[in-house]
Image (cartoon, helix red, strand yellow):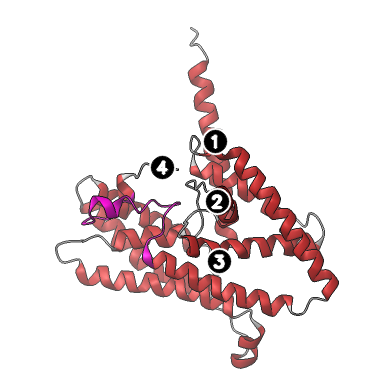
């Protein structure tokens, strides 16, 4: 599948060949891939530690549910493949994330919930392995069908930030640029990786129970302000749009606190549904003849 790369997704200073490799929701910049790989390793550790407490019969039911979920996703992905590139990536992602709501809504047996979690874990592992920056639940279907579509994931926040900080700020911004990039990287390591590690029993036994304070997410105010102010002072162009988008995405991550990526998945679903409705209304208005 060939996707057109928007100017906002092209880091300044990159050659045309390098720029074509980076499309948010489709391709992974290096740091985004490293973050995903680290998160996947911790997620596997967490899952092994958790599932080791299941009895054999329940674990077998979980695996069977995982296989069932995988088949459904692969079939749905193949059937929708022809239309995904014609709709907003937000809407396409929402379509594949809506089934995951069975867990928070308590629909179905617990083995189905754990099977869905096991399937999602597979996506966490496959995405960095394949270099696919789309939704984790579509990683296996993308591998099986050989078709990749631009879909979104909470990790795209890190991708946006990386693309922004890879640009050259110019002027006297270099020190603030470096400090903001370091603060952003520390945020992702602490809130996305260390927080997940705190739920793993061997870690709890070694260091005791701990939880990352949600207010620490306010450290993102620094990179948000840095990116936003730099964008305001820049002339219209690809760099300005890249900085604006990175600031917006990082700003949205602050109120989420430690509830990642769960709340961010919910946010993607909400944006996807709103996007679908707004586009539908616009189409209806264009087709409705004016009266007066």
Q: Earlier in the sequence, mark 2 or mark 3?
A: 3
Residue tagged by mark 1? 82
Disc 2 on helix, strand or loop? Answer: helix
Disc 2 packing (10 Å; few <14; some 14–19; many ≥20)? many
- Residue at 54% in and 35% down: 83
- Residue at 54% in and 22% down: 284
User: Which residues are drawn in magenta?
Assistant: 9-30
Q: Is 107 left, or right, of 205 in this rendering?
A: right
Q: Earlier in the sequence, mark 1 or mark 3?
A: 1
- Asked if marks 2 and 3 touch (Cβ < 8 Å), the reply is no
- In the rendered image, the residue lying farthest to the bottom is 206
Q: Earlier in the sequence, mark 1 or mark 2?
A: 1
Disc 4 packing (10 Å; few <14; some 14–19; many ≥20)? few
Disc 1 on helix, strand or loop? Answer: helix
Front-lying residue, 144 or 290: 144
Residue tagged by mark 3? 125
CA gap, disc 2 and disc 3: 13 Å
């Amino acid at each position: 599948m060939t996707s057109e790369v928007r100017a906002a997704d092209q880091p300044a200073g990159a050659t045309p060949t390098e720029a074509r490799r980076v499309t948010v929701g489709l391709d992974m910049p290096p740091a985004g891939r490293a973050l995903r790989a680290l998160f996947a390793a911790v997620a596997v550790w967490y899952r092994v530690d958790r599932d080791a407490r299941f009895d054999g019969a329940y674990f077998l039911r979980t695996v069977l549910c995982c296989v069932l979920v995988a088949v459904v996703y692969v079939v749905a992905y193949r059937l929708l493949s022809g239309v995904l590139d014609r709709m907003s990536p937000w809407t396409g992602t929402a379509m594949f994330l809506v089934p995951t709501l069975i867990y928070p809504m308590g629909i179905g047996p617990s083995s189905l919930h754990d099977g869905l979690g096991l399937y999602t874990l597979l996506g966490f592992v496959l995405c960095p392995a394949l270099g696919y920056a789309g939704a984790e639940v579509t990683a296996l279907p993308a591998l099986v069908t050989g078709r990749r579509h631009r879909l979104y994931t909470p990790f795209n926040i890190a991708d946006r930030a990386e693309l922004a900080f890879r640009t050259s700020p110019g002027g006297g911004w270099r020190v603030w640029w470096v400090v903001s990039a370091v603060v952003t990287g520390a945020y992702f390591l602490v809130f996305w990786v260390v927080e997940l590690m705190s739920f793993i029993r061997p870690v709890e036994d070694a260091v005791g129970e701990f939880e990352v304070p949600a207010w620490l997410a306010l450290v993102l105010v620094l990179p948000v302000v840095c990116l936003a102010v730099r964008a305001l002072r820049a002339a219209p162009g690809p760099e300005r749009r890249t900085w604006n988008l990175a600031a917006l995405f990082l700003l949205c991550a602050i109120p989420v606190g430690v509830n990642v990526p769960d709340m961010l998945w919910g946010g993607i679903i909400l944006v996807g549904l709103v996007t679908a409705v707004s586009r539908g209304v616009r189409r209806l208005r264009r087709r409705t003849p004016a009266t007066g």
